[in-house]
Amino acid sequence: MTVPFHPRAPGFMVAPHEAYRALRAQGPIHHEAETGIFYVLDHALAVEVLRAPARFSSAVDRAGLRAGGLPAEVLAIRQQGWPLAPTLSHNDAPSHEAFRALVAPLFLPRGLARIRPFVAARVAELVAALPAGQPVDFVAAFAVPLPIAVIGEVLGMRHLGDATLKRWSDAFADELGFLTSDERAIEIARETLACHRAMMALVDERRASEGEDAISLLARATIDGRPLAPGEILSLLTQLLVAGNETTTATLAFALLRLARAPALWGRLAAERRLIARFVEEVLRLDCPIQGQFRRAVADEVLGGVPIPSGSLLHVRFASGNRDEAVFGPDDDALRLDGPAPPPHLAFGLGLHFCIGAALSRLEITAALEALLDRFSGVALAAEAGALAFRTHFHHRNLLALPLTFAA
Ligand code: HEM
């Protein structure tokens, strides 16, 4: 194998696809001897796993994945808060469906129609504030502020400040990646406690509210005829907060990076607006902000000829399946805007856990691209591409900054 597969190493997220390609050439499943994790690398097997939740459970305890366990101080801080219940991502049938049904209305056409004018207004403000002809960090100036404002509005927490919500979301995201230092783990525990206290205070305030924000919805929701427990409400709200902005931020930055690297693309999308939707799907497929997710084998399995003992952890690398040569063709970094639409990608997952916010993120990204194409005539990288820095994370792929110059 020419490119080493070190998914925990700083810098792995710069070009993970090269490592996946080399691994796929060896077989559809990679077994990591040190941890026992089975990485699912090809598209067909990823689909098989994601479509079989009774065989491959989502109930995975991530706390145990952190090397060395958690510092005692983290456990002490956690004692002051509420233990989180499994609800969506880390949960299985039947309660997964019940919890999902509680928040689904936020993302169905009526919920999206409620948020659409807010998205349009925030996009317009942010695009108007971007300079023409001088460098700007697109991540800080646009890709972070848009989705954090939108999810703050959906949750009914925006009055606490976008910067505060982003700090809390970053804490949850880093925790999900379990590659943090002890100092950061302690800071994350403090941020989490502060966030959970703020969320519970708002829930208590809104028990009788008729509001349509997520907090009001969950404050008056019932499950099995009883109100939700704090650990259930907080689990739902924190998942929506982190999933609702981190990934959309990443996709916006990747879209602009691709536009900056292929100058003819700007003019083409500006002239043929119907291609924007396909461009967005291709960015999601190729850059895949959530590179993969865990599942646990419920019984002994054989996948791609590889025996997988009951209880084993699998990591379905969506990002590898999204570039599987057998499905998408040999040039695994080619953006395909022409010809028949490629088969569905895995960037939003598949099956029961398919991303609940897919339509909202598509709405945000499309509105952003439309407005940028309206205002500017092109975009270029304002720094050496090799200097781009990515967050160190086990499966989130995010640019930390993206210096761009827009042309008037
Ligand atoms: C480009 C943006 C996004 C990407 C790439 C993305 C990706 C994903 C993926 C891959 C999953 C499936 C995880 C699994 O199978 O275990 C997922 C689930 C989820 N996503 Fe997203 N997501 C995005 C935007 C959003 C937004 C905007 C929200 C909310 C506002 C959101 C909320 C969720 C939730 C709550 C789940 C768990 C669903 C369940 O387990 O039933 N996501 N997302």
Image (spheres, rainbow, N blue to C red):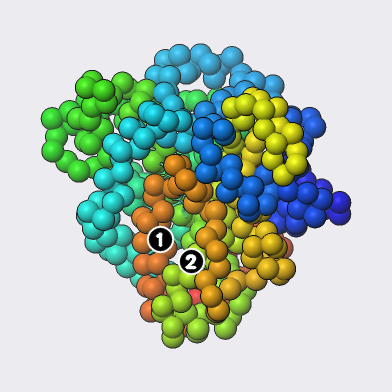
Q: Is residue 271 left or right of residue 6?
A: left
Ranked by sequence position, the earlier of labels 1 and 2 is 2
Given residues 301 and 233, the one toward you in this image is: 301
**Could you tell me which residue is drawn at 32 percent across and 22 percent down?**
230
Q: Quadrant of residue 303?
A: top right
- Residue 238 lies, with reference to residue 272, above or below; the image says above
The yes-or-no answer for disc 1 within 8 Å of ligand 1 is yes
Please name the residue that numbered disc 1 is placed on. Answer: 362
Given residues 370 and 329, the one toward you in this image is: 329
Give the crowd class for mark 2: few <14, some 14-19, many >=20 residues within 10 Å.
some
Q: Is residue 8 left or right of residue 51?
A: right
Q: Is residue 43 visible?
A: yes
Circle 1 SS class: helix
Please name the residue that numbered disc 2 is placed on. Answer: 280
**Mark 1 touching mark 2, by CB under 8 A?**
yes
The yes-or-no answer for disc 2 within 8 Å of ligand 1 is no
Say what amino acid the circle numbered 2 marks.
Val
Residue 268, image x and y in percent?
Answer: 50, 83
Q: Is residue 148 left or right of residue 247?
A: left
Disc 1 to disc 2, C-alpha distance: 8 Å
Residue 297, image x and y in percent?
Answer: 62, 30
Given residues 258 and 105, the one toward you in this image is: 105
Q: Is residue 136 visible?
A: no
Say what amino acid the circle numbered 1 marks.
Arg
**Could you tell me which residue is drawn at 44 percent across and 42 percent down?**
352
Residue 385, image x and y in percent?
Answer: 68, 66
**Could you tell me which residue is drawn at 39 percent across and 41 percent down?**
240
- Residue 75 lies, with reference to residue 275, above or below; the image says above
**Could you tell me which residue is drawn at 50 percent across and 25 percent down?**
189
Give the crowd class for mark 1: few <14, some 14-19, many >=20 residues within 10 Å.
some
Residue 404, image x and y in percent?
Answer: 55, 69
